[in-house]
Amino acid sequence: IGEIAQDLEKTFGDLLPCKRGADMAEAVEMGRGKVQFEASGVQLTAESQGRLDDVRRAFEGLAAPEVVVTGHTDRVGSIEVNDRLSLKRAEAVRDILVAAGFSREAIAVAGRGEREPLVPTDDEVAEPRNRRVEIKLR
């Protein structure tokens, strides 16, 4: 958290609700979120549906936020299929944020496929923690 908190403080300065200490973890969570997906599709897990609501609420209080939404997959399937799937996941989250009132133009989307796993695995291993979209404020 330390490095992320320093980056957030340097980048967003006065926009952060706090500056130091234990409250910085809350600021980190405001500037970054993660949601998980069911296998082989763009369906959020039940837990992540609630988490996305928290992310939306955190971003709502900020003036003109720019959001980067990056999709990821596990290592099941081909690289090409996973690249497309990760982009579809990012676009699905963007669409949810737009429906909540965020400007489409303020949301950049990208798909990283299986290239940046949270949990390294062998090829063709289904790892739920790798099926995610990361949402970052910049």
Image (cartoon, rainbow, N blue to C red):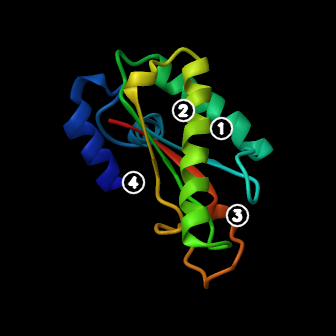
Type of amino acid under label 3: Pro
Q: Mark 2: which amino acid?
A: Arg
Q: Residue 3 location, x and y as percent? A: 30, 55
- In this rendering, would 30 be left or right of 52? left
Category of crowding for the residue at label 3, using alpha-carbon neighbours closer than 10 angstroms: few (below 14), some (14–19), many (at least 20): some
What label sits on residue 1 in the rendered view? 4
Identity of the residue drawn at 53% across and 60% down:
83
> Which image quadrant for residue 8?
top left
Question: What residue appears at the point 55 percent right and 21 percent down from the top-left corner?
Answer: 98
Q: Secondary structure at mark 4?
A: loop
Classify the position of the C terminus by image quarter. Answer: top left
Left or right for 136, reference 122: left
- Nearest the viewer among 26 and 91 is 91
- Tell me, for residue 51, which label it has, or none: 1
Q: Is residue 81 above or below residue 54?
A: below
- Closest to the observer: 72 or 129? 72
Determine the CA span between mark 1 and mark 4: 19 Å
Secondary structure, mark 2, is helix
Q: Which numbered disc flags the more N-terminal residue, 3 or 2?
A: 2
Closer to the camera in the image, 15 or 24: 15
| Distance in Å between CA atoms under marks 4 and 2 | 25 Å
Q: Earlier in the sequence, mark 1 or mark 4?
A: 4
Instruction: For marks 2 and 1, give the CA distance.
Output: 14 Å
| Image position, residue 46 (x, y; %) | 79, 43
Q: Which mark is residue 128?
A: 3
- Residue at mark 1 to residue at mark 3: CA–CA distance: 16 Å
Which badge, 1 or 3, comes first in the chain's sequence?
1
Which amino acid is tagged 1?
A: Arg
The alpha-carbon separation of the residues under discs 4 and 3 comes to: 23 Å
Q: Amino acid at mark 4?
A: Ile
